[in-house]
Image (spheres, helix red, strand yellow):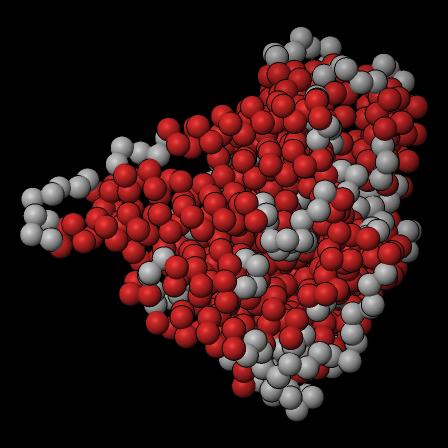
């Protein structure tokens, strides 16, 4: 699956593809300035009001727009993005919020900035951003966001903001380094990063002036070094490095400052004014002149390529590009955007712009930008890249738990998927996209939607993982025979033959269904087959795959009643992928969860301690801490303080995890938690913890009734549902021994 390709790697990958020679279904060359027949809508007053569902189309229309149409579209897009920035800062998703703010401002060019475009949540977004950048010591971006904030602040607040701005200017001036080159370099970097987020004439003029001074200082130093006394003059390594940076990239920075505004003529003039032709790459001058004289799609694309890292650099380090890496990336994005505007059917600019939108916190707009090129070209390579970017975009949403965003991305990708269905051997296949969205909907407890998506995936491609998920849905709906048939069919799928862990999951579910039906012999056979297959595959797996196998072995051993051996398997799972936090979280979650069900307080506490030492995500640790705290209360044991401390630290988190922590810390009642739940998944979780409160209070009958509601709820993929099922099953969850001899250590 291509999701393993990083976004930065994908940007390099896009430029490496030979799109220019792609067979075009339309018969047109990729560089021809021809839009697809589906033009952007004529801008109206309503385009200033963009909601999340309309955002993808609004971004696409903005990028397609002629310069005279941009302002009407720009305000709506920026205002909606600023709402996302404010929300992401509020949810403490700082990195994503910061990327989203950059994305909003990278769309705005000098002269387009208005106070109105920040929208109703612009103040909250800019206030949070300015505080974040100040905390990081990022003087350039801090100044930019304070300057933007000053535009919309009240008169009373402007004096305070001016104080911050004066302090930033002084701090930047006083921390420039010990030599003139270091000072000039620090001032240049701060001015350039300011202009990244502040598309104003003042910010641009300052960036140009500081960059020109930086170049001049380096040129003077080089002249002095080459003079008759040059050998006597000594400079520090730091001074020399800054001089080299100025001489090697200074004029490229000057050009990039103007390309941020799609202004190649301004770039040429700035280089002329700095008398810096001698140190400017001839190919850069040639490319700037070419696009200034005839701004067609292919020439803008050539310019975009010039600001990208060399294609043989695979690490993707920003450090490889120097202190001005972000500016070069923005210049490349704007140049590619111009190439896209002039020909939306050209695949390379569309792919590059789409991949950048994912990086800039606008994942849901990425597929919309790709649609014209995919429909016009119908080339398998273009389809592959478009589906890869779509999966990347959806994955970003999942990683941030922005499932609504992933859903919007999937909706925006429908034109791509429609074309991909007619392309043979697309990789990733459309079926994988449908399956991915189906799994997201299961996670979100939207089971009817999940079933439709997974059925669509299964209709396109036989896949064991998809059939397993459909079988789980059938079992949840009481369609036992249908579930058994799908599981039987799944075992013959090609992916199951390559994935021993997947085969193990299918056999374990077959065993559980047989056990629930009262067929102990069939349940034991399926369980024994699973254990034999998994044990035989141990030596052939490594890393995360080995960890998965060991966790499934632990589940099988627990079903046989071999708890001690199951714990050994979980220990081996931790050893298999010690630095993989996702695998560690899954393994430790299984350790703490089984201890919770078995009433093993010592085991649960040990698992929680391991989670803290492994520095797992707060979301994982809080749930483990809550289970430990509930177990302590249920067993009427004095708590050791570890779970309480972790819960208290997260109780003020504004997200759902904060409410879970507040409940665990005793600051929120179970009834209040139920009332606070909004999504189906949250309602299922709150119902489970309400049942636990009844269990702690001694109301076993009421607790069991509530747990049955949890099991019947749509939260099929939640750990709480699995825990509820195990608690209700009690001793019946075990089939009993003997355990087959399969050579486990």
**Outermost residue toward the top?**
638
Q: Is residue 528 above or below residue 415?
A: above
x, y percentage for residue 196? 54, 48
| Rendered residue at 82%/53% (across/down) | 48
* Residue drawn at point x = 62 percent, y = 16 percent: 645
Residue 539 in view in this figure: no
Q: Position of residue 357 (x, y in %)?
A: 63, 57
* Identity of the residue drawn at 68% across and 88% down: 25
Question: Viewed as shown, does residue 226 lie left or right of 480?
Answer: left
Question: Seen from this angle, which residue lies furthest front?
Answer: 273
Which of the pair 349/524 is nearer the observer?
A: 349
Question: Residue 382 lies in what quarter of the image?
Answer: bottom right
In the rendered view of the protein, which quadrant contains the N terminus? Answer: bottom right
Q: Position of residue 454 (x, y in %)?
A: 79, 62
Q: Nearer the viewer, residue 441 or 337?
A: 337
For residue 578, side relative to residue 359 (left or right)? left
Question: Which residue is depicted at the point 41% across and 46% down?
Answer: 210
Decide which of 404, 3 is in the foreground and name it. 404
- Which percent across, then down, holds residue 187? 40, 40
**Residue 639 visible to an observer of this rendering:** yes
Q: For residue 590, what is the image quadrant?
A: top right
């Amino acid at each position: 699956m291509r999701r393993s390709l990083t976004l930065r790697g994908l940007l390099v990958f896009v430029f490496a593809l030979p799109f220019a020679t792609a067979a075009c279904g339309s018969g047109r060359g990729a560089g021809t300035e021809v839009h697809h027949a589906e033009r952007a809508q004529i801008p109206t007053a309503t385009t200033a009001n963009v909601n999340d569902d309309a955002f993808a189309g609004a971004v696409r229309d903005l990028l397609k727009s002629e310069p005279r149409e941009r302002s009407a579209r720009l305000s709506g897009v920026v205002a909606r993005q600023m709402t996302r920035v404010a929300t992401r800062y509020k949810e403490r998703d700082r990195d994503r919020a910061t990327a989203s703010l950059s994305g909003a401002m990278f769309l705005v060019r000098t002269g387009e900035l208005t106070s109105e475009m920040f929208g109703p949540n612009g103040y909250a977004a800019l206030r949070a951003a300015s505080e974040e950048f100040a905390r990081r010591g990022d003087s350039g971006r801090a100044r930019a966001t304070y300057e933007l904030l000053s535009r919309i602040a009240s008169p009373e607040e402007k004096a305070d903001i001016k104080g911050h701005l004066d302090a930033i200017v002084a701090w930047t001036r006083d921390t420039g380094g010990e030599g003139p080159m270091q000072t000039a370099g620090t001032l240049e970097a701060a001015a350039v990063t300011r202009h990244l987020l502040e598309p104003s004439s003042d910010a641009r003029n300052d960036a140009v002036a500081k960059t020109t001074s930086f170049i001049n200082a380096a040129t003077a130093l080089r002249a002095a070094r080459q003079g008759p006394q040059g050998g006597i003059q000594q400079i520090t390594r730091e001074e020399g490095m800054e001089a080299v940076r100025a001489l090697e990239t200074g004029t490229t920075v000057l050009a990039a400052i103007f390309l941020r505004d799609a202004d190649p003529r301004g770039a040429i003039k700035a280089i002329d004014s700095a008398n810096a032709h001698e140190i400017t790459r001839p190919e850069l001058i040639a490319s700037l002149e070419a696009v200034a004289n005839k701004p067609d799609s292919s020439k803008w694309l050539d310019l975009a390529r010039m600001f990208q890292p060399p294609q043989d650099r695979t690490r993707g380090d920003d450090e490889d590009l120097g202190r001005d890496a972000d500016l070069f990336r923005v210049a490349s994005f704007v140049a590619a955007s111009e190439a896209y505007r002039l020909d939306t059917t050209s695949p390379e600019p569309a792919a590059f712009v789409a991949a950048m939108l994912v990086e800039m916190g606008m994942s849901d707009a990425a597929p919309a930008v790709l649609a014209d090129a995919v429909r016009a070209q119908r080339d398998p390579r273009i389809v592959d890249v478009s589906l890869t970017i779509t999966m990347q975009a959806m994955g970003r949403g999942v990683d941030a738990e922005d499932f609504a965003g992933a859903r919007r991305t999937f909706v925006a990708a429908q034109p791509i998927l429609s074309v991909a269905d007619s392309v043979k051997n697309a990789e990733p296949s459309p079926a994988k996209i449908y399956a991915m969205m189906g799994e997201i909907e299961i996670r979100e407890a939207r089971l009817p939607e999940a079933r439709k998506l997974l059925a669509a995936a299964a209709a396109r491609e036989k896949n064991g993982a998809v059939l397993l998920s459909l079988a789980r849905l059938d079992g949840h709906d009481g369609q036992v025979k249908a579930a058994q048939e799908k599981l039987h069919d799944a075992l013959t799928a090609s992916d199951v033959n390559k994935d021993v862990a997947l085969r193990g999951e299918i056999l374990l579910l077959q065993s559980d269904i047989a056990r629930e039906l009262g067929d102990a012999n069939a349940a034991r056979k399926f369980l024994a087959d699973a254990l034999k297959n998994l044990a035989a595959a141990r030596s052939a797996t490594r890393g995360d795959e080995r960890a998965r196998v060991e966790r499934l072995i632990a589940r099988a051993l627990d079903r046989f009643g071999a708890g001690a051996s199951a714990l050994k398997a979980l220990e081996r799972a931790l050893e298999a992928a010690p630095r993989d936090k996702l695998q560690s979280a899954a393994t430790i979650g299984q350790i703490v969860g089984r201890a919770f069900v078995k009433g093993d307080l010592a085991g649960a506490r040990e698992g929680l301690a391991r989670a803290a030492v492994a520095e797992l995500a707060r979301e994982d640790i809080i749930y483990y801490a809550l289970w430990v705290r509930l177990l302590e209360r249920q067993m009427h044991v004095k708590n050791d303080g570890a779970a309480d401390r972790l819960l208290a630290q997260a109780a003020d988190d504004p997200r759902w995890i904060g409410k879970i922590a507040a409940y665990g810390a005793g600051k929120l009642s179970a009834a209040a938690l139920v009332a606070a739940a909004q999504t189906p998944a949250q309602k299922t979780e709150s119902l489970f913890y309400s049942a636990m409160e009844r269990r702690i209070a001694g109301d076993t009958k009421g607790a069991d009734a509530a747990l049955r509601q949890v099991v019947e709820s749509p939260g099929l993929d939640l750990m709480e549902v699995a825990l509820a099922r195990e608690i209700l099953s009690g001793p019946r969850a075990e089939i009993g021994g003997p355990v087959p001899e399969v050579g486990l250590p």
